[in-house]
């Protein structure tokens, strides 16, 4: 890692590599009730006490959109200097998981509520613009709890159906420090607007971190890996550093990188 000039590079014997990062930030909408039901969203309630028939996906239940969540997303879009789309569409993203009773997540795929925008970062060596690809609304899933019992997994559906804003950045970030500044900037914009409390300990703000590397000076992007659901800035930075070095090692060995989804092990780092 070079520190003298502020460029973040990974150095090997004869080569220098640049790191390219794009984030999918999941920001929980600050709202009393869920995206498609009237259940409360309050953090820390007894498990399964904030679950309506809609959230539990009982037969015949129909989702009804929460107008306030739409307003919150639009407000956030304006804060990101982004295009607000007059028409947006919800889709079903089907997958099976124990904490997803519907068997699908209601999300926005082709037509998100917010389009392209930008965020300006104040870095030690000047301002840096980070492009926003889109912001879409989607439902959160419930929570599977694996560490309370050696034999059983418990499911808490309180979070099921809570509104999330997924804010997708362009692959414009180049270092762990830029990622840290970007997350803090997003958080301060949303806190100021009152659209997300930004509380990372409670999971209100978490990110999928996409990382690739390329030879310094190259114009083409390398193959990315996505590190899922990282919930602290420190862990994001550590995960980027680890993942970028792993990719550089593969390239140095003449191997190629497989696009894959990975998890950051917070114990083993
Ligand atoms: P997916 O749903 O497949 O993860 P998205 O479009 O929602 O796709 O998100 C892709 C994310 O990956 C964006 O944040 C984007 O900036 C980032 N990204 C795309 N290509 C690269 C790359 N080569 N290196 C690093 N990040 C990338
Ligand atoms: Mg992704």
Image (cartoon, rainbow, N blue to C red):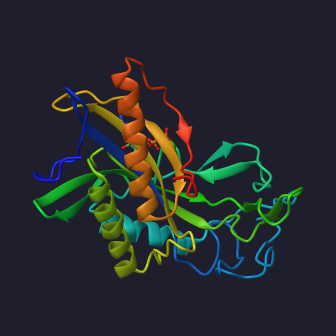
Q: In percent of the image, x 33 and y 73: which residue is there? A: 189
Q: Is residue 256 left or right of residue 149?
A: left
Q: In screen coordinates, is 175 left or right of 228?
A: left
Q: Tell me residue 112's x, y (percent).
A: 46, 51
Residue visible at 76% across and 48% down in the picture? 97
Q: Percent from the top left, x then y, of residue 187? A: 38, 71
Residue 113 showing in the rendered view:
no
Residue 104 pos. (x, y %) = 71, 48
Would residue 121 be seen by someone viewing this image from the given angle? yes
Tell me: residue 101, above or below residue 75: above
Q: Nearer the viewer, residue 142 or 221?
A: 221
Q: Is residue 122 above or below residue 253?
A: below
Residue at 13 percent across and 64 percent down: it is: 124
Residue 59 at x, y percent in the picture: 88, 56
Q: Is residue 218 left or right of residue 93?
A: left
- What is the count of numbered marks? 0
Residue 158: which quarter of the image?
A: bottom right
156 and 93: which one is in front?
Answer: 156
Which quadrant of the structure image shows residue 139? bottom right
């Amino acid at each position: 890692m070079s520190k003298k000039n502020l460029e973040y590079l990974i150095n090997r014997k004869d080569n220098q590599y640049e790191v390219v990062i794009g984030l999918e930030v999941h920001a929980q909408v600050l709202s009393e009730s869920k995206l498609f039901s009237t259940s409360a969203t309050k953090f820390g309630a007894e498990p399964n006490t904030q679950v309506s028939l809609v959230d539990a996906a009982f037969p015949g239940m129909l989702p009804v959109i929460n107008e306030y969540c739409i307003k919150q997303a639009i407000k956030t879009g304006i804060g990101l200097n982004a295009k607000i789309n007059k028409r947006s569409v919800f889709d079903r993203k089907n997958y099976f998981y124990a904490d997803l009773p519907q068997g699908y997540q209601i999300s926005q795929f082709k037509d998100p509520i917010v389009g392209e925008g930008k965020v300006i970062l104040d870095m030690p060596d000047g301002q840096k613009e980070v492009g926003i690809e889109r912001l879409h609304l989607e439902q959160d899933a419930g929570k599977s709890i694996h560490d309370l019992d050696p034999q059983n997994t418990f499911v808490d559906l309180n979070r099921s159906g809570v509104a999330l804003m997924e804010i997708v950045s362009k692959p414009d970030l180049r270092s762990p420090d830029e990622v840290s500044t970007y997350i803090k900037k997003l958080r301060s914009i949303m806190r100021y607007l009152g659209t997300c409390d930004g509380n990372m300990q409670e999971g209100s703000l978490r990110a999928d971190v996409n990382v690739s590397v390329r030879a310094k000076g190259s114009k083409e992007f390398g193959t990315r890996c996505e590190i899922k659901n990282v919930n602290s800035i420190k862990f994001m930075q550590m995960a980027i550093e680890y993942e970028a070095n792993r990719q550089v090692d593969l390239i140095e060995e003449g191997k190629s990188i497989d696009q894959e989804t990975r998890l950051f092990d917070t114990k083993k780092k």
